[in-house]
Image (spheres, rainbow, N blue to C red):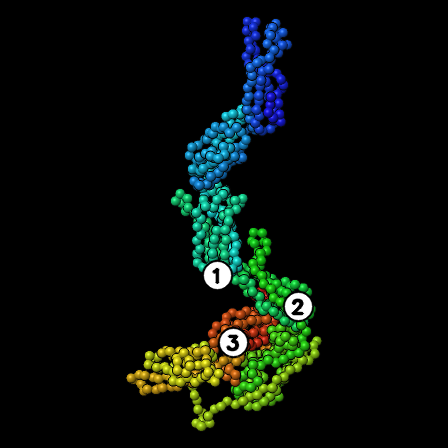
């Protein structure tokens, strides 16, 4: 009887067969048997056999007579039979890196569970059965090499199974990562370990590796372990850009007292892309150049896209307002992968652009009352929204600016008059107003083009005379005009070691009297060091600085210097370069290729120029593709007139609440003709 007929059946139900042999005409019985037929399923059955009676048919053939028909005793037996599939393994080839904690595993299924293991080498790896699973064989590396394991099932008549085990150790480290990171962002570095045959070593647990990271410069990058990708055999590290700069990254490990290093990777941390200004207002049919800074310079270029057709993107950040309305401009710092030429977007930024209809103009002046002998910067803005000269000067067709005055107490001049340049009306979006003598005058402005109406504006200004002494005549007093928190170094014709500097008197302005403690040093308007450095504090007023000559070989001479501390009212650009040109030939534009320098002056509420002023100057150009801003140092701006065209410079002081600004129109052209010359040989 079979306990589970779904697993097996017998060929001769109810019978047992007898094997016999013939000896001297006798039948000699050997053993009884039955044929069990498996049904190709795994499992265990209980086979029960019980003798019930003799088979009378066979006894009769043998002429045997018996009175026993049944047996009183229970003659039976049982057996458990296990049906299993042939021995198989989960893998026939195993590759492990050499580390005592790195264990591989081989699952042997199904089999009987009783095996004989034979290995070709005793030094490469150990093979140990798992204590909790008799079908799981653990592989422990011992040394680099190859071993062949043969597995034989002791309970089955089946073929032997062979497993090839290869133990390898680290020979090289390779790192895959993007070598440009935006500040504040992070990328993943994938570290792979290779053996001597350039095969990637598998990774199961990262603690088996003692990977170290070395940086050539501290503070630029932060490298931390992130994860392990077992499928790709990678150890992942997160690399974060902390500060702008360049640092080399090297990964290393050691095995058997041998140090292994990756190739150094130079990683650049770059600033995020920033396009300025963020909110742009341009008149219809005008152009404006968006300034872009940031990205992995110089390994990137800038691209711009418009959200709709209100703005037309021309090239290099130059946009044109073609329809009224508001849209968004997206700037991108992009590069290309050398291997496949795929585009990479390193950083993005956006700006809002509004296109409006020009409705009028206005004259902007920092003062309406100013002192005789001083100069004011005047510039034109558009209505509505205070459209700046940077966009007014790019309207198509070009606007002309006609300036005039009602009185000879003032005069209009141009920034580039000292260079001998005859500035055209199209370029007079900013001018200079000179105070010649006391009086009042009206400054008139007419703005027009071939396709626009005439826009007008006017302001009234007054020139007043400075206070000075008539008696004694030609009286001259030494004085300094400083802004709060500025400093100025005094210099004399005498040896500094023989001079003594001191502050004789601090005189406070009316606005600071209520706030300033007169009897404390912290309340002083200015201080002076032993070496003659005059430092203005964050207060307004005036003080007298005394300089005395104290030398045994010279008379005791003292000088008093009046130091006035006042806030800055406006700033002004003045051309500092010289242009050598033929006075008989009028120059209508600045020459392409010229290096043009400007000095920045600071002025008080009367137009007087400061001796020294604390500032935070910022410069912009409407066409960064035409004008290169090289340097702004010691209040001197140096530019390169790289390409022909028209652009506007804007300088502003961010240190002041009013953020005073000044504009200068630059019209650049070829002045050497012909531009290209062909010369015949000989």
What residue occupies the far left of the structure in this picture? 552
Residue nearest the observer in this picture, 527 or 646: 527
Q: What residue sits 59% from the left and 56% below the top?
A: 343
Residue nearest the observer in this picture, 133 or 582: 133
- Density class for disc 2 (Cα within 10 Å; few <14, some 14-19, many ≥20) is some
Q: Is residue 582 visible?
A: no
Q: What residue sits 58% from the left and 68% below the top?
A: 276
Q: Which element carries disc 1, helix, strand or loop?
A: loop
Q: Distance from label 2 to label 3 (Cα)?
A: 31 Å
Q: Does 149 appear above or below 546?
A: above
Name which of mark 2 and mark 3 comes first in the sequence: 2
Q: Which residue is mark 2?
A: 326
Q: Distance from label 1 to label 2 (Cα)?
A: 36 Å
Q: Does 451 appear above or below 101?
A: below
Q: Which residue is mark 3?
A: 656
Task: Describe residue 494's horizontal placement relative to residue 144 as left or right.
Answer: left
Q: Distance from label 1 to label 3 (Cα)?
A: 29 Å
Residue 232: percent from left, percent from top: 53, 45
Task: Describe residue 341's horizontal placement relative to residue 196 as left or right.
Answer: right
Q: Does 577 appear above or below 471?
A: above
Residue 96: percent from left, percent from top: 48, 39
Task: Describe residue 380's horizontal placement relative to residue 507 as left or right.
Answer: right
Which image quarter is the C terminus in?
bottom right
| Residue 649 occupies quadrant | bottom right
Residue 627: percent from left, percent from top: 56, 70
Q: Which mark is residue 243?
A: 1
Residue 331: percent from left, percent from top: 60, 63
- Density class for disc 1 (Cα within 10 Å; few <14, some 14-19, many ≥20) is some
Q: Are marks 1 and 2 in contact (CB under 8 Å)?
A: no
Q: Which element carries disc 3, helix, strand or loop?
A: loop
């Amino acid at each position: 009887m079979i306990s589970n007929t779904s697993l097996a059946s017998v060929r001769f139900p109810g019978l047992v067969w007898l094997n016999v042999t013939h000896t001297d005409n006798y039948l000699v019985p050997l053993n009884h048997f039955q044929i069990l037929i498996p049904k190709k399923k795994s499992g265990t059955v209980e086979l029960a056999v019980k003798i019930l009676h003799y088979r009378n048919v066979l006894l009769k053939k043998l002429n045997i007579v018996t009175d026993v028909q049944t047996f009183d005793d229970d003659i039976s037996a049982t057996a458990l039979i296990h049906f299993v599939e042939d021995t198989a393994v989960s893998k026939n080839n195993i590759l492990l890196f050499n580390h005592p904690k790195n264990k591989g595993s081989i699952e042997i299924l199904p089999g009987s569970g009783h095996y004989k293991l034979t290995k070709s080498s005793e030094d490469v790896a150990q093979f140990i059965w798992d204590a909790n699973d008799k079908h799981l064989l653990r592989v422990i590396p011992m040394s680099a090499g190859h071993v062949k394991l043969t597995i034989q099932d002791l309970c089955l008549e089946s073929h032997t199974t062979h497993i090839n085990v290869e133990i390898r150790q680290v020979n090289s480290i390779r790192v895959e990562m993007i070598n440009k990171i935006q500040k504040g962002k992070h990328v993943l570095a994938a570290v792979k370990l290779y053996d001597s045959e350039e095969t990637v070593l598998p990774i199961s647990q990262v603690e088996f590796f003692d990977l170290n990271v070395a940086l050539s410069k501290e503070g630029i990058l932060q490298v931390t372990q992130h994860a392990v990708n077992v499928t790709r055999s990678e150890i992942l590290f997160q690399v974060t850009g902390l500060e702008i700069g360049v640092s080399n990254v090297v990964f290393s490990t050691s095995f058997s007292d041998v140090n292994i290093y990756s190739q150094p990777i130079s990683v650049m941390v770059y600033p995020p892309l920033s396009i300025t200004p963020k909110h742009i207002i341009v008149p219809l049919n005008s152009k404006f150049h968006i300034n872009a800074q940031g990205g992995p310079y110089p390994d990137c270029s800038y691209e711009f896209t418009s959200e709709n057709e209100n703005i037309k993107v021309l090239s290099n950040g130059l946009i044109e307002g073609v329809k009224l309305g508001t849209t968004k401009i997206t700037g991108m710092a992009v590069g290309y992968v050398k291997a496949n030429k795929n585009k990479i977007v390193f950083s993005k930024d956006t700006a809002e652009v509004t296109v409006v209809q020009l409705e009028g103009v206005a004259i902007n002046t920092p003062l309406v009352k100013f002192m005789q002998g001083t100069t004011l910067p005047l510039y034109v803005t558009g209505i509505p929204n205070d459209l700046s000269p940077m966009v007014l000067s790019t309207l198509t067709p070009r606007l002309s600016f006609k300036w005039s005055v009602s009185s000879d107490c003032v005069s209009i001049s141009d920034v580039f008059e000292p260079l001998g340049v005859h500035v055209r009306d199209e370029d007079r979006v900013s001018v200079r107003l000179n105070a010649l003598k006391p009086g009042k005058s009206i400054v008139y402005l007419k703005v027009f083009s071939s396709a626009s109406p005439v826009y007008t504006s006017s302001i009234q200004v007054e020139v007043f005379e400075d206070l000075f002494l008539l008696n004694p005549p030609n009286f001259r007093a030494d004085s300094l005009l400083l802004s709060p928190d500025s400093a100025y170094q005094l210099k004399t014709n005498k040896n500094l070691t023989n001079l003594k500097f001191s502050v004789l008197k601090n005189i406070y302005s009316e606005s600071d009297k209520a706030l300033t403690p007169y009897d404390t040093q912290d309340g002083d308007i200015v201080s002076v060091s032993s070496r003659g450095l005059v430092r203005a504090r964050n207060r307004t007023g005036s003080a007298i600085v005394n300089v005395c000559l104290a030398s045994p070989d010279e008379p005791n001479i003292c000088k008093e210097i009046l130091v006035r501390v006042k806030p800055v009212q406006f700033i002004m650009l003045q051309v500092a370069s010289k242009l050598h040109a033929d006075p008989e030939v009028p120059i209508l534009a600045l020459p392409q290729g010229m290096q043009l320098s400007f000095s920045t002056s600071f002025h008080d509420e009367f137009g007087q120029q400061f001796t020294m002023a604390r500032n935070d100057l910022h410069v912009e150009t409407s066409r960064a593709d035409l004008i290169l801003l090289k340097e702004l140092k010691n209040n001197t701006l140096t530019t390169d007139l790289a390409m022909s065209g028209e652009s506007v410079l804007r300088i502003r002081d961010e240190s002041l609440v009013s953020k005073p600004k000044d504009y200068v129109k630059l019209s650049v052209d070829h002045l050497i003709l012909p531009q290209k010359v062909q010369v015949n040989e000989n």
